[in-house]
Image (cartoon, grey):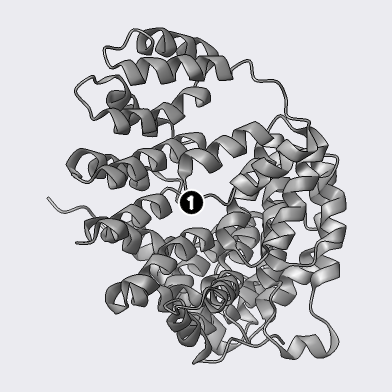
Amino acid sequence: MTLRPRATEVPELVRRLGSRHPRQVDRARAKLAIMGSHSVDPLVEALEGASDRVRANVMPLLALIQDPRGREPISAMLLDREARMREIAARSLARFACPEAVAALERLVKREKVRDVRIAALHGLIELYEGGQEPAIRRVLEVLVDPQEEPKVRLAALALVPLLKPSARRSLKRRLKQDPVEEVARRAEEVAEDDDTPAVRDRSRLEALVKDLASPDYAVWNEAVHRLASGGPAASEAIVVEMRRRAGDPEYCVRAGMALKALGARRCLGDFLDEIDEPLPLQVIVEVIGAVGEKALIYRLKNLIDRVAPRGSSASRFDTMQRVRAKAHLELARIGSRVAIADLQAILADDGTRLPLEAFTAVELIGKKDEIPLLLGAYLREDHFTRRHIARVVRSILKRERIRRNSRMLSSIPSEARRALDGILGRSRGRATRRPRH
């Protein structure tokens, strides 16, 4: 059994986010990121009453953790009185790749008066577009081609151009090179020249780009991501070395993951699984392997799960690798594999800790009747938000496996779990039979 963080530990770590000592802040950020969903509720609470220093660190952490509970509180911060808080909220919301985030940032671009906040919102929309949210392009294009817009805001929107399809990119460049604003026309010309930039192979240049990933300037680190995409295996190695050196910096790890995904490097990823011991870099490598989608690599995640699973005396401490394992299980489940199901069942049976949402999503994809009692046990332990997630998973498995509520298997489960199941199925039936109001 792994242990939950002490009741006072997470609030204390959140409080340290307001420290004036950078090392103390960095350690708190790293540990909260590793805890994942365990830390979400105290982080959300901090957005309501903590100092600006704390809130400025909380929003990027919620964005990194990617728990759905974090999105709406960050969206609410777009209305904060402080421009700096609105800017951080815009950059953080961009990590939630969903239509709601696109709509919120579009509204911010339209109503915001402060230039830096508008730029952050545009960069957020560009990041969402790159992450697959196609509608995010609309407002960025409107700003980019509007001569009445502030030039510096339009220049920020130019970051979209390299992401467009070749025909759309050429057409937009031709238009912008004729723009009445001289600076916009000149920068459009420079972007055009960047198309022919040779692949980065020089070691010193690679190291410089890897360090640029840590820049607070979106334009700098975003350009580094795209330049590194042409660097091949040498770039992958350089990125991972620096990511391990900055293993306690959640934001850097996220950006390193973007660069590795852009590289699509297959050959090195398996070796990284065997070499890396730090939780945040390992989470990144697992996500990159899932994005690459090569089955041979995904199956190697079983070896990673075996390597980092708690055993012996370590089982009495909080498992810093729990979310790594859960993410690995999710990638295996996405290809329909139950090769590591024993460990996934062990995670579900762990009654000493809050469970990561990725574990439940994995079970939803590959779960069978054997996982139903474990899910019901977790349902009895978890909070209201997680219970809703588990209920959906249980209903999905019952439907897929064609298990009836009066089956012999379900009739043999403990009475408390049976009451939980009746509640789940009762709510499901209530929703299905509810008639719309006229």
Percent across and percent down for residue 125 are 39, 38
Residue at x 32%, y 28% (from the top left corner)? 154
Whether residue 251 is visible: yes
Residue at x 25%, y 56% (from the top left corner)? 83
Q: Is residue 214 above or below residue 236?
A: below
Place residue 173 in its image quadrant.
top left
Q: What amino acid type is highlighted by mark number 1?
A: Pro
Q: Which residue is mark 1?
A: 216
Residue at x 60%, y 47% (from the top left corner)? 213
Q: Is residue 216 above or below residue 163?
A: below
Percent across and percent down for residue 10 are 50, 84
Viewer-side residue, 264 vs 229: 229
Percent across and percent down for residue 143 are 28, 27
Percent across and percent down for residue 204 are 75, 39
In the structure shown, which secondary structural element does the residue marked by tag 1 occupy? loop
Residue at x 64%, y 54% (from the top left corner)? 365
Place residue 124 in its image quadrant.
top left
Place residue 376 in its image quadrant.
bottom right
